[in-house]
């Protein structure tokens, strides 16, 4: 069990619980606006939330029991599984309707605001629990994404999509680099490729373990969903005479 200060559990709750909560709120409201019945939209949100909480509970147990520390290959497996689950979740009728909403391109950026919680990694570095080689790129990258998100949302609402494309690309690269550096700097002594002290073994412990295995896959999926929504908006705009051209993107 970790000996991280108690306030880290509070900070970790911001992305781990906040990003799914904001996402589900977006899905519910856009699905209802698209004509999905209240019962169907509510059922989708409730079931989705219960599945996410069940997944977090499994990860909590796996970390608290030491399973993730002993079998670090389970970490990338968990990230992959949850990413696939979220991508498949987008095929649920109510979710698919929400993702096709006219304002989805801007709304899907909203959960990324909570990426400012990436300061957690910097704080963990400062108290000697994470290596700078992981903590600085991962933490500062997330903070930059979180700060930029509201401005990008406004640009999309004004029909300027180029910024959103670059925002999503940068956000994806930030997450991929963070995952790679976390693995290379050592989830365990046996798997450490880049020799740094301390290693990134704290990422297999509570509460930090919940970020790469829950919040990160969802954030990746949201970037993908938003890029698809932007492409749909650009195509729709270009199909209407005298409305939105690539010059306004």
Image: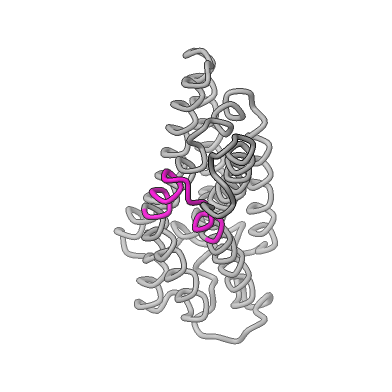
- Foreground pick, 146 / 158: 158
Q: Quadrant of residue 152?
A: bottom left
Can you say whether 155 is above or below 176 in the image?
above
Residue sitting at 61 percent across and 59 percent down? 68
The percent position of residue 231, horizontal first and vertical second, equals: 63, 45
Can you say whether 152 is above or below 204 in the image?
above
Of all residues, the one furthest to the front in this rendering is 242
Q: Quadrant of residue 186?
A: bottom right
- Foreground pick, 144 / 21: 144
Residue sitting at 60 percent across and 47 percent down? 221
Q: Is residue 117 magenta?
A: no
Q: Is residue 158 magenta?
A: yes
Question: Is residue 34 shown left or right of residue 153?
Answer: right
Question: Is residue 131 shown left or right of residue 124?
Answer: right
The percent position of residue 166, horizontal first and vertical second, equals: 54, 61
Can you say whether 34 is above or below 208 in the image?
above
Question: Is residue 114 shown left or right of residue 228?
Answer: left
Of all residues, the one furthest to the left in this rendering is 7
The percent position of residue 26, horizontal first and vertical second, equals: 45, 33
Residue bounds of the magenta highlight: 151-166
- Foreground pick, 187 / 146: 146
Residue sitting at 32 percent across and 53 percent down? 10
Q: Main secondary structure of the magenta part?
A: helix
The percent position of residue 188, horizontal first and vertical second, equals: 61, 73
Can you say whether 206 is above or below 90 in the image?
below
Residue sitting at 40 percent across and 44 percent down? 18
- Colour basis: one colour
Confirm whether residue 179 shows in the render: yes
């Amino acid at each position: 069990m970790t000996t991280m200060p108690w306030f880290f559990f509070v900070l970790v709750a911001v992305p781990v619980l906040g990003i799914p909560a904001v996402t589900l709120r977006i899905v519910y409201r856009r699905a209802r606006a698209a004509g999905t019945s209240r019962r169907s939209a509510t059922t989708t949100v409730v079931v989705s939330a219960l599945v996410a909480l069940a997944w977090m509970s499994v990860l909590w147990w796996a970390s608290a029991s030491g399973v993730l520390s002993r079998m670090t290959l389970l970490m990338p497996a968990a990230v992959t599984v949850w990413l696939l689950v979220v991508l498949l979740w987008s095929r649920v009728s109510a979710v698919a309707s929400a993702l096709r909403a006219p304002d989805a391109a801007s709304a899907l950026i909203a959960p990324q605001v909570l990426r400012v919680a990436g300061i957690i990694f910097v704080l963990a570095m400062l108290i000697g629990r994470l290596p700078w080689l992981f903590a600085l790129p991962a933490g500062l990258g997330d903070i930059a994404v979180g700060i930029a998100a509201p401005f990008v949302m406004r640009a999309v609402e004004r029909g300027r999509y180029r910024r959103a494309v670059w925002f999503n690309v940068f956000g994806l690269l930030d997450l991929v680099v963070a995952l790679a550096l976390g693995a290379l700097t050592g989830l365990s002594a046996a798997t450490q490729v880049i020799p740094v002290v301390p290693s990134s073994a704290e990422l297999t412990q509570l509460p930090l373990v919940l970020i790469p295995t829950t919040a990160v896959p969802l954030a990746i999926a949201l970037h993908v969903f938003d890029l698809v929504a932007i492409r749909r908006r650009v195509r729709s705009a270009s199909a209407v005479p005298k409305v939105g051209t690539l010059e306004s993107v």
